[in-house]
Amino acid sequence: MTPAVKILTPKYDIADRAQAAGGVTRIDWADNEMPVLAKIRERFERERPLDGIRVGACLHVTTETANLMRTLIAGGAEVALCASNPLSTRDDVAAALVDRYDCGVFAIHGEDTDTYYRHIDAVCDIRPHVTMDDGADVISTLHSRRREQIPEIIGGTEETTTGVVRLKALERQGKLEYPIIAVNEAMTKHLFDNRYGTGQSTMDGIIRATNILIAGRTVAVIGYGWCGKGVAMRASGLGAHVIVCEVNPLRALEAVMDGFEVLTGVQAAARANVMISVTGNRDAVAGEMFDVMQDGVILCNAGHFDVEINKDDLSAITAEREEVRPLVERHRTNDGRRIHLLADGRLVNLSAAEGHPAAVMDMSFANQALAAEHLVKHGAGLDNRVYVVPEEIDAQIAALKLESLRVNIDTLTDVQRKYLDTWEQGT
Ligand code: ADE
């Protein structure tokens, strides 16, 4: 499907176009750390695989995302981008994308909920052929309020664990109306972005917001998926005593054998100086946990949505609240304890810091660019299912990343390859 008509919609709604120059400098800085994506961009410029394709993207509006948008545009796509979180938008980046890179952007840092959804609608208004989500908000809008557009859509991609969980639920109910490539499921995505990206950027966000010393503190990490593993590893590396809470027995066991203390949420709440939720589920910090927390505890969330820390439960025991530093809200409880909530329970790494470093987003967004190309080439033959990224794409990205890091690896000899192909040979 290669429609010739360009849809005329307002091109942007951003805070301040005059900030573009600063945005360009920061986007270039990130680009230095994104060699795999740069290589794909060079090829896209030559081959134009996305010519005539409209991409509707809902991602964190960061320098790294800007380099992905540049790549899609280099490939011939017309692109509109909105934010996947109201606090993660960098207004200078939004300005640069509009002013210098011909990308439609609908995102303003700190936008309210109505504006957030109005911006999702603005992206849908370009009538995308390919959707690109981080949290499935565009896909969910198209599957509910804007179903008439679905026949125009070739497919979509999803960046994050939470989005993939939502989409698999849609697929299980037989209600998924177009094919999705779950970028999160690529090895070159979750093994690096979720683990090393979330690990580093979450600690970065906590430190930027509070300037506390991590060494010697007790840090509870709730959720031991790839993100939780990364956060626990980095908190431990900074000298914290790390407690892990996990509902999945296999993962809990893994945490025990990785050397962490494993406790229930309530037990951990009674001991922690810092609690970090990374579960992808609601109410990871809720109810009775608030009753037993220590005076001075710091709470934050590194999961996609702001449902992990139950703010209603916290408000119910709050006598007064005060912003004591930017992004740090102190709740004085009815019994006199101080509970500090960071970034209003939103993703702390993107609200208080700059999200994952560009070097990991390089691989995540290489997957996004190649998944979009794959959808354009092969989408017509795909079913309405949630697909993993094709293995060749994953392998290609790993090889390119190693090359960019100037790491050489050995290859199997013919004898070794043959050995792996046989079953007869034992001891
Ligand atoms: N998700 C996590 N970190 C990110 C970043 N730096 N840019 C875009 N999306 C992200």
Image (tube, grey):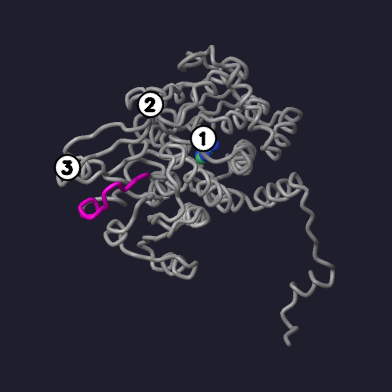
In front: mark 2 or mark 1? 1
The quadrant holding residue 220 is bottom left
- Spot occupied by residue 320 in the image (x, y as percentages of width and height): 19, 35
Helix, strand or loop for disc 1: loop
The quadrant holding residue 303 is top left
Give the amino acid at mark 2. Answer: Tyr
> Which of 317/362 is in front?
317
The first of marks 2 and 3 along the sequence is 2
Image point 37% across, 38% down: which residue? 346
In front: mark 2 or mark 3? 3
Measure how far apart labels 1 and 3 are at the Cα level.
32 Å
**Magenta-tinted stretch:** 288-300
Image point 45% across, 16% down: which residue? 15
Give the amino acid at mark 3. Answer: Ala
Q: Quadrant of the N terminus?
A: top right
Question: In this image, 37 relative to 159: left or right?
Answer: right
Give the amino acid at mark 1. Answer: Glu
> Is the CB of the residue bearing disc 1 within 8 angstroms of ligand 1?
yes
Measure how far apart labels 2 and 3 are at the Cα level.
27 Å
- Spot occupied by residue 338 in the image (x, y as percentages of width and height): 25, 43
On the image, numbered disc 2 is attached to which residue? Answer: 116
Mark 1, other Cα within 10 Å: few <14 / some 14–19 / many ≥20: many
On the image, numbered disc 1 is attached to which residue? Answer: 354
Image point 58% across, 14% down: which residue? 99
- Spot occupied by residue 335 in the image (x, y as percentages of width and height): 15, 47
